[in-house]
Image (cartoon, grey):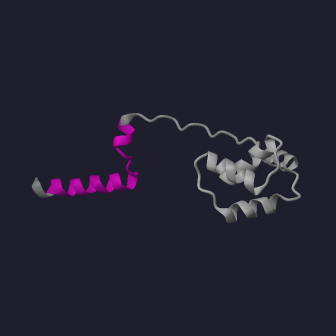
Amino acid sequence: MEYVYAALLLHKLGKPIDEAGIKKIIEAAGGTVDEIKVKALVASLQGINIDEAIKSATTVAVTPVAAQPAAPAQAPEAEAKPEKPKEEEKKEEEALAGLSALFG
């Protein structure tokens, strides 16, 4: 990505986007230059209208996204005690009734 940024910086400054310019920017930023990536980037940008590419990229990237409503806050008691289905409650009551019959 830093190579693309270097190319954009050169373009913004009105300088030619060539291997030497990209290498200088990467080295000045403290990065290690990969010759293959530099050559590939320069070759791929030949004949590209960068201004048009930037305009078309920004119009696509600016589409708004609908915000999701925040979940309502729950009381701490509700978080600590999970709700049981009614069927489980009935089974527990029946089991307790059976145990009480055994012990009198």
Question: Which residue is found at the position 34% from the left and 43% from the top?
Answer: 81
Residue 78: percent from left, percent from top: 39, 39
Is the stretch drawn in magenta largely helix, strand or loop?
helix
Q: Is residue 39 left or right of residue 99?
A: right
Question: Which residue is found at the position 28% from the left and 52% from the top?
Answer: 93
Q: Is residue 30 left or right of residue 36?
A: left
Residue 86: percent from left, percent from top: 39, 51
Question: Which residue is found at the position 78% from the left and 55% from the top?
Answer: 18
Q: Quadrant of residue 29?
A: top right
Q: Is residue 92 magenta?
A: yes
User: Along the line of sight, which residue is nearer the eye, 52 or 3?
Assistant: 3
User: Along the line of sight, which residue is nearer the eye, 26 or 1?
Assistant: 26
Q: Is residue 73 left or right of residue 1?
A: left
What is the count of numbered marks? Answer: 0
Question: Which residue is found at the position 28% from the left and 54% from the top?
Answer: 92
User: Along the line of sight, which residue is nearer the eye, 72 or 33?
Assistant: 33
User: Along the line of sight, which residue is nearer the eye, 51 or 66?
Assistant: 51
What are the residue bounds of the magenta stretch? Answer: 77-101
Vertical position of residue 79 compared to residue 85: above or below = above
Residue 82: percent from left, percent from top: 37, 46
Q: Is residue 83 left or right of residue 72?
A: left
Q: Is residue 88 magenta?
A: yes
